[in-house]
Image (cartoon, rainbow, N blue to C red):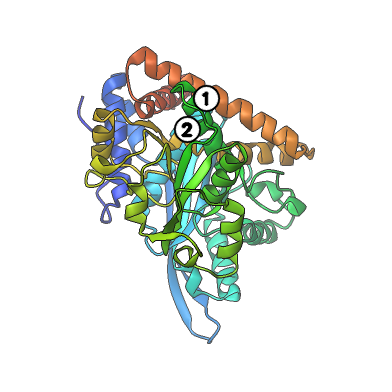
Amino acid sequence: MTAIHAIAEPAQDPAYAIAMAQFNAVADRLGLDDGMRALLAMPKRELTTNFPVKMDDGSVRVFTGYRTQHNLARGPAKGGIRYHPQVSLSEVRALAMWMTWKCAVVNIPYGGAKGGVAVDPKALSQGELERLTRRYASEISLIIGPHSDIPAPDVNTNARVMSWILDTYSMNVGFSVPGVVTGKPVELGGSQGREEATGRGVAIVAREAMQLMGKPLQGARVVIQGFGNVGSHAARILHQWGSNIIGVSDSSGGVFNPKGLNPSDMEEFRAAGGRYCDYPGNNCITNAELLELPCDILVPAALENQITERNAPSIQAPLIVEGANGPTTPAADAILKERGITVVPDILANAGGVTVSYFEWVQGLEHYFWSLEEVNDKLERIMTHAFNEVAAFSRRESVTMRDAALMLGVQRVVQAVKLRGIFP
């Protein structure tokens, strides 16, 4: 079969090259025909918008935003919105593709989408951030909606941003539509447990992977790159389950203590404006050094392209659980496989967020809300079942966990496309 290559438009983001390399490899393994490969390699629909925002000083700046829907065969599009200076169309395409496979791996009825604005939100005031969000929401309202495409928080966005999108969309249609986004405040129809869901899912699959490897979670040394929403919640839950968090980091750097760190104390210190490098009684290290620390579980929970062929030979963790999307390049994957390091891939490991987003969406449609215990119990069942399915597929086909998850996810999407057929 002929490999399907990246769409030739803007300069390609490394994430898109990774996503396409993964897809082409899996398409080869599954023997997909050229038509199906072309269909799944390309986004179904995408929107690029250049929009003005009035700044606090009265000037006007133009920002570029995107919303991409990769595939809708299994249901409405679902995916986060990120605010970051490096957001690009090709990055959003990659993330939307990964969302398609992710939803299929945990078997929830969504297709993949992603969106974002190329902006440094830390450089904006609260008022500027709100005006940017509301204008962006108005621009993408052409394609989002509670039954078509449901955004959620991602890098540098949160429940507050989702509230602005909800309000703006509702103003445009003339009535309240809480189902247009997930990850919103509980007071506006959000779900209990949504904020910690991705981190909880990471912790669940880390526990299951350690059990599969015959190793105890109690006392396991854990290193987490990216102590944001995902990393901090994963750390807190793993700490509660008896693991020893020995290293954490954010964009400013990291801290290492072989005797262990208290995640709650670290969060409070950071929330008070402190840098992890300044945390008393600990060793300050770089993000690069953090990835190479001796540990039992490594959780890359920052951005894409963190574990590469340059540092993969130096990784000392026998288990990597991907809290971020696309943190490991294909070249690094090959090295890690050769070294016998187990990688629980992003499309499985960080699927807890979209799973509880699905719960939130269902609750909103039914106007009936669940307790935190119900949400966590349902998340536990879905994540453990998905992990066991991927692990069994991996053993049966003698492939890595990543290949198993991708093959399982792509197979389910292919089946949906074939059942729906091509019209006319």
Residue in front for this viewpoint, 44 or 370: 370
Single out the residue that lies furthest toward the right: 368
Q: What whole-number distance in Å separates the C-alpha atoms at marks 2 and 1?
A: 7 Å
**Disc 1 designates what residue?**
386
For the question of whether residue 404 can be seen, the reply is yes
The quarter holding residue 400 reads top left
The quarter holding residue 336 reads top left
Q: How many marks?
A: 2
The quarter holding residue 265 reads bottom right
Query: Judging from the image, what secondary structure is the residue with disc 1 in?
Result: helix
Question: From the viewer's perspective, is residue 210 above or below residue 183?
Answer: above
Residue in front for this viewpoint, 142 or 280: 280
Residue type marked 1: Ala
Side (left or right) of 419 relative to 356: left
Question: From the viewer's perspective, is residue 287 above or below residue 208?
Answer: below
Single out the residue that lies furthest toward the bottom: 57
Percent across and percent down for residue 263 are 57, 52
Percent across and percent down for residue 351 are 52, 37
Percent across and percent down for residue 194 are 65, 45
Question: From the viewer's perspective, is residue 327 above or below residue 373?
Answer: below
Label 2 Cα crowd, 10 Å radius (few <14 / some 14-19 / many 20+): many
Query: Judging from the image, what secondary structure is the residue with disc 2 in?
Result: helix
Residue type marked 2: Leu
For the question of whether residue 323 can be seen, the reply is no
| Quadrant including the N terminus | top left
On residue 348, the disc is 2
Q: Are marks 2 and 1 in contact (CB under 8 Å)?
A: yes
